[in-house]
Amino acid sequence: MSKISDLGEIIREFGPHLHDAPYDGWRADREIERMVPTHCPYCGMQCGLYLLVERGRVVGLEPRYDFPVNEGRLCPKGVTAYLQVHHPDRLLHPLIKRDGKFVRASWDEALDLVVARFREIQAKHGKDALAVYSGSSLTTEKTYLMGKFARVALGTRYVDYNGRLCMVSAAAANLKAFGVDRGSANPWSDIPLAEVLLIAGANCAETFPILNKFLWQQRDNGGRWIIVDPRQTPTARQGDIHLQLKPGTDVALANGLLHVIIEEGLTDDEFIADHTVGWDEVRSTVARYTPQVAAEITGVPAERIVAAARLYGRARTAMVFHARGIEHHSHGVNNALAYINLVLATGKIGAPGRGYGTITGQGNGQGGREHGQKADQLPGQRSISNPEHRRAICAVWGISEEDLPPAGVSVVEMFERMRRGEIRGLLSLCNNVMVSLPDTNTVRRTLEELDFYVCIDFFMSESARYADVVLPGTAWSEDEGVTTNGEGRVVKINRANDPPGEARHDWWIICEIARRLGRGKYFPFQSPRDIFEEIRLASRGGNADYYGMAWEKIEQNNGIFWPCPTPDHPGTPRMFEDHRFYHPDGRARFHAVEYEPPAETPDEEFPLILTTGRVVYQYLSGNQTRRIKFLVDQCPEPYVEIHPETARRLGIQDGERVRVRSRRGEGIFPALVTETIRPDTIFIPYHWPEPQAANLLTNPVLDPVSKIPEFKACAARIEKLKGGALPLYGATRKGASQSEA
Ligand SMILES: Nc1nc2c(c(=O)[nH]1)N[C@H]1C(S)=C(S)[C@@H](COP(=O)(O)OP(=O)(O)OC[C@H]3O[C@@H](n4cnc5c(=O)[nH]c(N)nc54)[C@H](O)[C@@H]3O)O[C@H]1N2
Ligand SMILES: Nc1nc2c(c(=O)[nH]1)N[C@H]1C(S)=C(S)[C@@H](COP(=O)(O)OP(=O)(O)OC[C@H]3O[C@@H](n4cnc5c(=O)[nH]c(N)nc54)[C@H](O)[C@@H]3O)O[C@H]1N2
Ligand code: SF4
Ligand SMILES: [Mo]
């Protein structure tokens, strides 16, 4: 039988329903009893805000002027974030599925069932028959707990996290090039000091709106921007040079830029000689990428490539940033390495205004990839395959080395193993695979076939609907802990209200399952602070060293940048200042990379390139933002961006509903006919579930190193619907890509 007997009933009970600002939040006579300083739950900027508490309820928020990242600014998601807290859709008690329907259960009943089923599965199929899938919208304390829980409580090798869909290509490239993975080598306050910014595959205006504060300061100082994106995004429109490349061709573009920089004598030969390894191979590789060759592959005119190379190469100070546009590819790691080559060849790193960064996605995208919830990682950015690292962590955890499982596999590979029946049960916290994993049709079948699936969330997600047990966890305002923002700044999240109904803290739920599995002595935590204290010890001596931090110290300093190895250490806002990198010889590594096309390229049957991404008004799988009326009013549904030339050829009107099809699935979307996209490319924002999930179409092929899926390029076609589809204005018109930034 299907795992869901009545979807309508689930939606009626658990939403998504729309929720607007409660009127009494805005009464003139309201009595705010507390203003709790904390940070936005959404993106990696981690803007500072106060939650306003009245009679124990969060009734509003105010931006924090004292927090240097946002200085009183918030974006549309930030200002409405508090509406999640007492939202009518909140999950208030545990649910157990019986005959395809969710039935209310007590905590004892639900947890006993979880433990009994886990034991049964492991007894029958071995320890590795269970998998844990976690997230990075969690505090670092919880992310640490998830890695430890998988390895120590369940004893399974299978644990991974949603940063696998997000940051891992950049992380792998950083590790290869610099020997350490801190997304941004520089604090964002360096941005205004750069003469030139090169921003590749990042639509900051929509995805990191408050970063614009720094970007515009840089412009005010006379700075210039080079933007690399297949779409003329709100970010690209503000740029000086827009390199509107074909999706998936960044290596050719970056190699072409470096070719020109070498030709024009703009390399920093002293820096290359003193601080790097591998230059000769890179130089001979890029020799083949003349501007003409690069133009041929990327579709960007050769003279623009030359102009951009000169602008970046001649600048005294400059910074390179990239995000998922170059990383969500089957060659995502190579894409990032190609841009890092530019930075190293010109020595533009390690000084104010000279720098590099990948812009981290989720609120705790950085912290969530440091302390052991990655398939191959142990706390402190240690490797689970390194005997010395294993020894260090086993000593902290008090387990013997034989009991520490080996490396697991990435989430997409875990799902493959579920499909093959090797993994039979799944515990997930903080992700929504039915929207966010590629190839939704296969994901759905996999969830249907799992023996046992437990989901911890505070809203019923499209994935949780397939669970056997749903446990109500806590929203960000209900717990304490730390997150690390995209700069590497560790900040403190504070508690404003109690969990509603019978909802429990995520960390309590995990520790309680461990206790009931008989592993309680390894999880003695009474509070998140206890967990933080263990992270300090477990990260000590690792790359991401938090040993010198304390919650109070973090709050007093408006955050502390890691590494912070000793209690008297002030933290490290700017990495590589002395041009010492983290490889044993202190040198950074060049990597010669060749252009290779995406796994799927257009052909007669599927003649267009589909790329996917975001809009400013929705967040990730949308499980949090598709319930907030203001955000839904601005952008209620996905759409497909089509160039007017392509639309004309297919006879498609702006606003008309069309079918988009790929080798894996199809969906119906209103057409947004716009000149801002390349004629060979279409774009769909991915925040919605079936039947309008962009991921019904995407290709689950992985980068061989980082194992990130190719969300940003697959082959697709557009079909006109028979019977004439009604144009739909309004909804799509308000899509942020259409608005002037
Ligand atoms: N509003 C909002 N903000 C968010 C999020 C959200 O969901 N909503 N999510 C957060 C998270 S987790 C993340 S990871 C970040 C993501 O932040 P971004 O990476 O900025 O967001 P995307 O829209 O996924 O992709 C960025 C751009 O890549 C371009 N692109 C597509 N293919 C290519 C290519 O081959 N090469 C190049 N150079 N560019 C390409 C797209 O046109 C798009 O404009 O945003 C964070 N902030
Ligand atoms: N096609 C396509 N697909 C993509 C992308 C793309 O650009 N294109 N981007 C990818 C990227 S970069 C990312 S990061 C992923 C994100 O993909 P997911 O991580 O799967 O999506 P989220 O919406 O973040 O899911 C988080 C879930 O956990 C819940 N949650 C949030 N915080 C907490 C908490 O503190 N406690 C508990 N218990 N629950 C919590 C939310 O309600 C939500 O249901 O999507 C990826 N998928
Ligand atoms: S920029 Fe990011 S952290 Fe800041 S308010 Fe918007 S979503 Fe929140
Ligand atoms: Mo992300």
Image: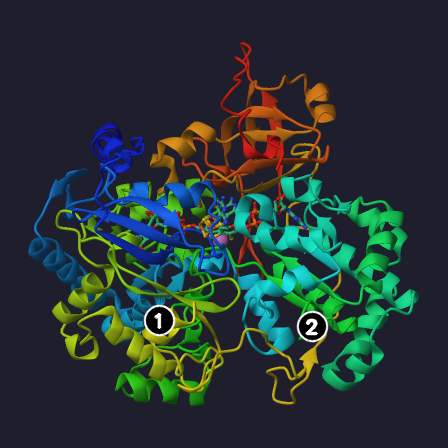
- The answer to which of 106 and 310 lies nearer the viewer is 310
| Model colouring | rainbow
* Tag 1: amino acid: Arg
Which amino acid, by three-letter code, is at mark 2?
Answer: Ile
Position of 710 with respect to 477 (left or right) is right
- For image coordinates 22% across by 40% down, the residue present is 30
In this rendering, is residue 100 above or below 545?
above
- Tell me: residue 58, above or below residue 544: above
Give the residue at x 49% y 31%: 638
Residue behind label 1 places its C-beta within 8 angstroms of ligand 2:
no
Residue 741 place in picture, x, y as percent: 61, 37
> For the point 30% across and 54% down, which residue is it?
476
Horizontal side of residue 711 vs 13, given as left or right: right
Dividing the picture into quadrants, the one containing residue 706 is: bottom right
Quadrant housing residue 722: top right
Q: Which mark is first along the chain, 2 or 1? A: 1
The answer, for residue 705, to whether it is visible in the render is no
The residue where tag 1 is placed is 157
- Give the camera-side residue of 470 and 567: 567
Residue wearing tag 2: 349
The secondary structure type at the circle numbered 2 is loop
On-image quarter of the N terminus: top left
Marks 1/2 in contact by CB < 8 Å: the verdict is: no
